[in-house]
Amino acid sequence: SYELTQPPSVSVSPGQTASITCSGDKLGNKYACWYQQKPGQSPVLVIYQDTKRPSGIPERFSGSNSGNTATLTISGTQAMDEADYYCQAWDSSTHVVFGGGTKLTVL
Amino acid sequence: QLQLQESGPGLVKPSETLSLTCTVSGGSISSTSYYWGWIRQPPGKGLEWIGSISYGGSTYYSPSLKSRVTISVDTSKNQFSLKVTSVTAADTAVYYCARQSSSGGAFDIWGQGTMVTVS
């Protein structure tokens, strides 16, 4: 079965850039998206179709996907960005797979 | 504004069937642009896709759950439903319903989630 691997945790200082990776076999051939989840809340889509931001998502969130790795980048990270982040891959054969999640700490 | 709301029992006995319904309001479930999906999250753990359905009834299931899961849609009620048979404690989780884009597969609108305990 298809698997996506994320680092369990990432730390970043306020105002700096945070990068969260998501690895999977030939992931660049699939669509990748990213979700932010804060404690006790439902996930929120922050990046879809590799690089696109939904309406209302700040410009500091960006995404890329190539080869075996998709990356979520948060520029000028703010305290409010502290959350769990999940990547998800989709294609017509494997359908939906989620990564294990990354806890982003802003300190 | 489209909203999704899960409903169903919060407690299910082992070996029985878990049944949940997702009611879509503020828009129609009958769109070729979207699928409608179920995702679950065990306490303290990550997200797990269960399956998705189109308004026409085409279904796509997680390989790990396929033998125990059925998803159906009722367009007249603007609802879709989940059944998981032969549940165990491992099925204890928050269950979310969500709208899924048919182009790219992202879940862009989520329900608030409902906690289901198997005990």
Image (cartoon, coloured by chain):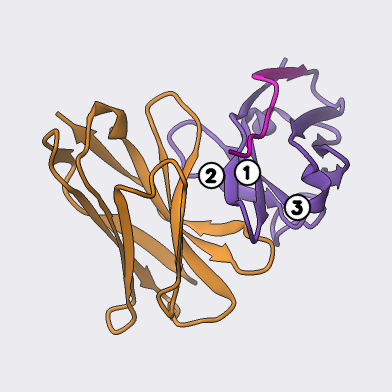
Chain colours: A purple, B orange
Find the distance from the CA under tag 3 to the CA under tag 2: 21 Å
Q: Quadrant of the C terminus of chain B?
A: top left
Find the distance from the CA under tag 1 to the CA under tag 2: 6 Å
Asked which quadrant contains residue A56, the reply is bottom right
Q: Are marks 1 and 2 in contact (CB under 8 Å)?
A: yes
**Crowding at label 3, few (<14), some or many (≥20) Cα neighbours within 10 Å?**
many
Marks 3, 1 in one chain = yes
* Magenta span of residues: A1-11
Chain ID at mark 3: A
Q: Which residue is identified by label 2?
A: A43
Q: Are marks 3 and 2 in contact (CB under 8 Å)?
A: no
Magenta span: predominant SS is loop
Which residue lies at the image location 82% right of the left edge and 53% below the top edge?
Answer: A51
Disc sitting over residue A35 in the figure: 1
Whether residue B41 sits left or right of residue A91 in the image: it is left
Which residue lies at the image location 50% right of the left edge and 37% below the top edge?
Answer: B47
**Crowding at label 2, few (<14), some or many (≥20) Cα neighbours within 10 Å?**
many
Task: Report the mark closest to the observer, 3 or 1.
Answer: 3
Chain ID at mark 1: A
Q: Which residue is identified by label 3?
A: A30
Q: Earlier in the sequence, mark 1 or mark 2?
A: 1
Q: Earlier in the sequence, mark 3 or mark 1?
A: 3
Chain ID at mark 2: A
Q: How many marks?
A: 3
Which residue lies at the image location 47% right of the left edge and 48% below the top edge?
Answer: B62
